[in-house]
Amino acid sequence: MPVLAANGITKRFGGVVALNGASFACEAGEIHALLGGNGAGKSTLVKILTGVQPADAGTITLKGQPVDFSDPAAASAAGIVPVFQELSLIPDLTVAENLFMGREPRRFGLMDRRAMRRAAAELLESLRFPPIDPAATVRDLPLAERQLVEIAKAIGRRPDVLILDEATSALGAQEVERVFATLRTLREQGMAIVFISHRMEEVRALCDRATIFRDGQDVATVNVADTDPEEIVRLMIGRQLEEVFPPKPPAHEDAPILRVENLRWEPALRGISLTLHRGEILGLAGLEGQGQGDLLLALFGVYAGATGSVQVDGRPLHLGSPAAAMAAGLALVPEDRKTQGLILPLSVRENISLPVLPKLSHGGVIAPELERRTTHEMIGRLSIKTASSDTPVRFLSGGNQQKVAIAKWLTTQAQIYLMYDPTRGIDVGTKQEIYRLMRSLADEGRAILFFSTDLAEIIGLCDRALVMYEGAVVRELAGDELTKEALIAASLGMSDAVRAQMESVA
Amino acid sequence: MASIGESGEARLGDEQLPAPGVARLRALTSERYRPLVVAYGLILVILIVTGLRHPGFVSFDNLRNQLVLASFLGIAAAGQTILILTGGIDLSLAWNLNFSAILMTQLTKSDMSAGRVTWAIFLALFSGCVFGCLNGLGIAYLRIPPLVMTLGMNAVLLGLTLYYTKGTPQGTAPDVILRLATGRVAGIPWAVLLWIVVSAVLIFVLRRTVFGRRLYAIGNNVRAAYLSGVPVRRVLIVSYTAAGFFAGLTGLLLTGYSNQSYIRMGDAYVLPSIAAVVVGGTSILGGSGGYAGTIAGAIIITLLQNVLSIENRSQADQQILFGLIVLIMLLIYGREAKIRE
């Protein structure tokens, strides 16, 4: 008997049918993947299973008993605990305080900090996660460690069903492997784990079975080990995929469009030098939090104290403000599209036109026709799925939001695109559209400097890659050198000597 | 440029919308316009309910007089609207308008020549702008929270006023200001005409200009706005300067209305100006709303003041009512926002 089963779940939002009679069952002691493109209904199903939203129709049973959760606390008390991509931690509290939020150890009626810290250390150690100080304030942790704390917090509640909704998308390969080891142990102990990820490799490495969703319905449940990845992708999108990455053109010999020398912003950036050519996609690799994000922000003029020389097309660029960087032809697609890249309550049109408003106006007055035309051109070019250009961006799916975050820079005619993990948390189909867009921008003679947590993207998309480690570029890889092994070795800060030794042993 | 994906999938809803009339009707009842419909509906309710009890309330003369009073509040709330849209607020309104008013009457107390009056009016409005600008500089560069910055500026202005007047302001309003606040042309009060002009300009600026669009961007998400190249500091400084200008203008109008300047003449405008903005549906957190709502809000607040005085209610009742209005409106609109999420 499945520990958790959903039957015929239907959910509508206004006129949109998010789930249309979807069913799904998960056994104790299995890791079960939910797969599907954006808008397939996975996230809505998770929200219903965890009491965030009520279903319009259908039943849920937990350990054979029908359940109907009024809120997330009820679901959590019954044994269903989710971890979402959006973090729920309170930034100003410590790791320990977050881990035991709502169930703090008490002594004489007061919170027992010492006991809590000890219990937190034990919990983190039992999960075999990388060392995280339980006394550290969450705000000071890099995103990946915060995500690990989030996962630990959920596991600490000893749920019957643990749901991970894109919970590994902020993690680097190393951290993912540690989390997987822990999840496998939990599986052996009989926990049911529902796993949602856009990284197919993760699903193949971890999951026993997978249920595939499309257009609000479950189309198939398969044994992962017996099924081709191509078959799964075909079920997800309902059509055969073409080549994942667009072909790379031959190397270019143009003069560099961007030249950076000895860029410093201690302690995050410790003397970065690089060149970027027209028509080139330059990858930034390495574990997350090694300064890649800071490099992009510094180049975009966000860090007032950054020093070093930056030249765009041979002209020096003063790192003063984003406005100055934009005037020099730079664009930034930042790490967090929801808080940095987009203004969620504003419409698709208002978001796309924001960086380019001065050009869409005469004497400070916006030309409505020009703005509408520009917006529609972008909606068409990027196939942004939105009810209208006046729809607030927050109503769009993650992939379409990301397209808007990129579209706003196509209007400025930017020449250099700085992108931080532009495909995080979006579905396979949209990812491919973004890959093709990046390649077409490069082919038009623009240049892209981008960071990705997905090694396959760096290898498949980039002409060259720079591996960053602790605020410095430790290795440059191009052509045939650009392999998973080389990227990982450099990411871990292994010196050339050590690597040569390892290779000779092998 | 190459198009990516199946461009046929892009749905440009504008083309799918039903006939324009239907669309407009639907737009009127949509979430965005609901606060406006509620606010203007509330004006009707007040007129009908009070009119049935006190027919004199809905007489032409009374309503025209109320509209003059509403124009003072509406102009004070113009600055407040701009700032609340950015996520800020102006608590220095009370003494900024008071200082401007006193500056004008003191400067003209012994010389009412046209040149002197022009100079005094210019200086009074300029003073409003300067203190507004200082608010903006403190908030944009020193990152002082708007609440604290403008509250501090309010105290400074209070002190300056007392120094300048030694506690007893002198002089009367120049003719032109008197006429602006109390006079009429073809039966229409000049003050109301001025309010119409201010409203038209402000609604245009907020809806149609780059500056207006940037206000909304900053009010919703200052970080994303900054990363999109919005000159956040400049926009904030211009906003606070404009709010200072409207405070000064309100000071001149109030001086004209009572033909004198006096200590504490602005105190009665701080909370009502904020109330007018939130009653008009502008989010106190910034980023959504507009001046069309504030116009309704200013009329509602003014009519309520009138109703209370007709009903012989005390000053205490008025204060409690305005406090409650602000809190209740925040509760209603705040809840709606939550339900929509």
Image: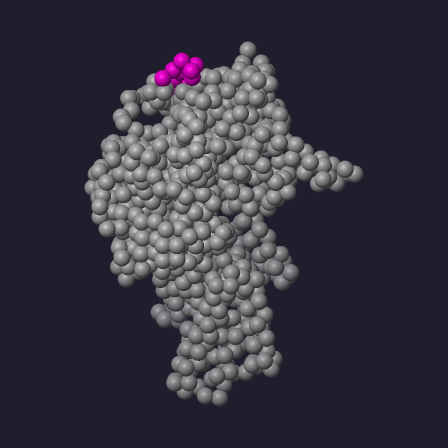
Q: Residue farthest to the left? A: B1
- Rendered position, B122 above or below A245: below
**Visible residue check, residue B20:** no
Residue A219 part of the magenta segment: yes
Residue B199 pos. (x, y %): 39, 61
- Judge whether A265 appears above or below A23 on screen: below
Q: Which residue is painted at 35% across and 69% down in the image?
A: B186
* Residue A496: quadrant of the picture: top left
* Residue extending furthest toward the top: A1
Stretch of the chain drawn in magenta: A216-228
Q: Is residue B316 magenta?
A: no
Q: Quadrant where the N terminus of chain A lies? A: top right
User: Taking A219 as reference, is A71 above or below it?
Assistant: below
- In the foreground, B216 or A319: A319
Residue A385 at what x, y percent from top left?
A: 32, 35
* Residue drawn where x is 27% and y is 43% of the image: A280
Q: Residue B185: percent from the left, percent from the top?
A: 36, 71
Numbered label tally: 0
The residue lying furthest to the bottom in this view is: B110
Whether residue A90 is visible, yes or no, is yes
Quadrant of image for the C terminus of chain A = top left
Left or right of B162, for residue A84: left
Front residue of B250 and A452 = A452
Residue drawn at x 48%, y 83% is B107
Image coordinates for residue B203, horizontal then vertical, percent: 37, 57
Q: Which residue is rendered at x = 29% and y = 39% of the image?
A: A463
